[in-house]
Structure formats: C-alpha cells, structure tokens
Amino acid sequence: MTDPLPLIYDLDLPELQDLLKSWGEPAFRARQIWQGLYQHLWDAPEQFTNIPASLREKLFTGFRFSALQPAQVLSSNDGETVKTLFTLWDGRAIEAVLMRYSERRTLCISSQAGCAMGCVFCATGQMGFKRHLTSGEIVAQVLHYARILQAENDHVTNVVIMGMGEPFHNYNAVLHAVDRLNHPEGFKFGERRFTISTVGLVPLIRRFADENRQINLAISLHAVDDAQRSSMMPVNKQYPISKLLEACRYYINKTRRRVTFEWALIRDVNDSPETAIRLAGLLKGMLCHVNVIPLNPTQRYPGQASTRERAQAFQAELEKRGITCSIRIRRGVDIQAGCGQLAIQASDASNQP
C-alpha cells in the first residue's frame, strides 16, 4: 500500500504558516486556510473561496482533506445516539459516537485503532493494538460531527476521549489534537470541555499533572483489589491500585482538579454494597467523583450488566460515606455503542491482522 498524501489536519498553525511561506505565499493566507478548516468547517476545494484558485489547487493536490470514510452509521431507536464506523486510509477501522442530551452534544472519539491494554470486558481491548491515530485523525472525528451538527444549527459541547484506544498510550498525538481544537483562531473548543480517560498509565498521569492543563481526567478503576483488577485489566500488574491512586493524589495536589473514577458495573463481579464500601475507603479524602455505568456487554466477555437496583444500592453506599457518585445512563445499547463493538466485527469479517 502506497503512503497517502499528508493530512491537512496534522498541521498546526505555525507549520501551515511555514508551508505557505515556502510556497511564496503571504503570511495571512495561512490564517485564511486555518479559519476555513476550523471555523467554517470547510473540507472541499470549492469552499475555500477566500484564497486564489491557484493556491486552492496546490493545497488540494498536496494534502488530503478527508481522513475518515464513514463505512457504517447506526442510530439508536430514540434517535439520541449516532455511532459511526470509519475506515482510515490503510483500511483500519475506528469508531466515534455522538450522544445528544437535553443541553449537551457529547462526542466520544477514538485515539487508536485497537488497543494494547487488553481489558477483558472491552471490545477494543479484545481486538488488540493495530496502530496509533495521528493527531489529525483524532481532530477529524470531531470535525465530522461538528459539520453534522452545524447543518442542524447546533454544535458540539463536550468531547470525551474514551472511545477506541488508550489515550495516554498515544499521549503526544492526543494532546496535539486537543491543542489544535482549542486554538483561539480556529475551532476555539475550551480545554475544560475535554475529558481524557485512561486505564492508569502512572508515569503519564504524573506528566499530565505537571503540565497543569484544564482538561478533565477520568480513571478506569473497576475493582478494589489488585487480584481482581489484574484479572480484568492487565495494566494493573505493572501499575497496581496503590501506585495508581498515589498518582491520582499527585494530580489532584498539583492541579487542584477533581478526578473522575469510571466504574463499569458487572453483575456479581464488582457491584455489591460491600465492594462500594471498600471503594469508599480507598477514595476517602480525595477530590474525586465516581461515575458508574452498567456494563455494555460484548460477545467475547461473559459478564452482564448490573440491574438498576444494584447500581442504586452501590451509589447509596458511596454517598453515605461522602463519595459523590452518578449513575451514567447507558446510551446506544441497541446499536452496540460500546467502544470497538463495530470495529471488532469489521476486523473479524476482513480477517485483518
């Protein structure tokens, strides 16, 4: 397979300015292109009427403006959740999801094709690692849904980077994508509206803390003891719970920002009141919040979702002990909206390694 043209969304503004300078173009042309990409959301040559035709031709013969090809689009029965399976230039598949709430339009986007972390209950973990996404491929997922919402006179309000892949395993590309979308002359999407979810790569949590960004941090925890967490999440063998929570406390002390702990409630595995009591003990004194969600079942994991009653009992035990807890509504279960569920089917069908 031949290498494709470079992707325009992989350039930041200074790189675009240097490119235009090398082409003998005035400096202001770079900002015109940047604003076309990120403010007007243009992605076709004829839309860039603010630059000369000769420059348009040079730009579109030298760069790709399309990073993602929608291969499958599924909408939930209530119309509130839309999941898209995208094909990348090399045939790899990734997913992104748009979730409409009463006052929010939240995107869940991917950072990798596949995932190296191997969490047993996660469809993406079950398919293994394929490759990192570039920063531009991450950006393109947001712009894809931004165009859809723009056509409805609506806009993206939140982005969670907790789709396919482990974001901190692709740290630089993820943060470059956030910076590009946050740029004040472009998409202008504030850092506080991003959430990055990690399985707990301790050195990178500490690095993230030292950078003191305004991005929200979520930690996939899911167990209160190392034996169980290691059986569910192999990363725990390298970074056990004690080291993970130590890194979280470092992050809180450094940034004064709250950590969200994600907890997939699995029936008769980690959903008992006793488990909630132990979890409250682990998190005592931390500036944190627990976000529980009944498991999205996958074909390769036998676990089942907890009942609503079990989830509420779990929540009650935490809140009695001063740990704030929310029960997240499962979205898109009827369209397999859990990360990686469509991509693993596509991978199986194509037998792509």
Image (cartoon, helix red, strand yellow):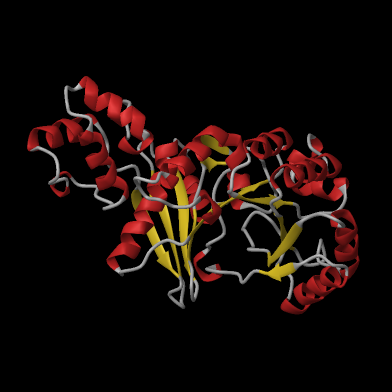
Q: Nearer the viewer, residue 319 or 220?
A: 319
The answer to whether 225 appears left or right of 46 in the picture is right
Q: Residue at left 42%, top 53%?
A: 85
Q: Nearer the viewer, residue 138 or 192?
A: 192
Q: Residue at left 56%, top 35%?
A: 170
Q: Is residue 52 above or below residue 299?
A: above
Q: Nearer the viewer, residue 128 or 76?
A: 76
Q: Residue at left 42%, top 65%?
A: 74
Q: Nearer the viewer, residue 182 or 144?
A: 182
Image location of residue 192, percent across then percent down: 55, 54
The answer to whether 33 appears left or right of 90 in the picture is left
Image location of residue 116, percent across then percent down: 62, 37
Q: Quadrant of the N terminus?
A: top left
Q: Residue at left 90%, top 58%?
A: 281
Image location of residue 180, percent across then percent down: 42, 41
Res 288 quadrant in image? bottom right
Res 237 seen here:
yes
Image location of residue 238, percent across then percent down: 79, 34
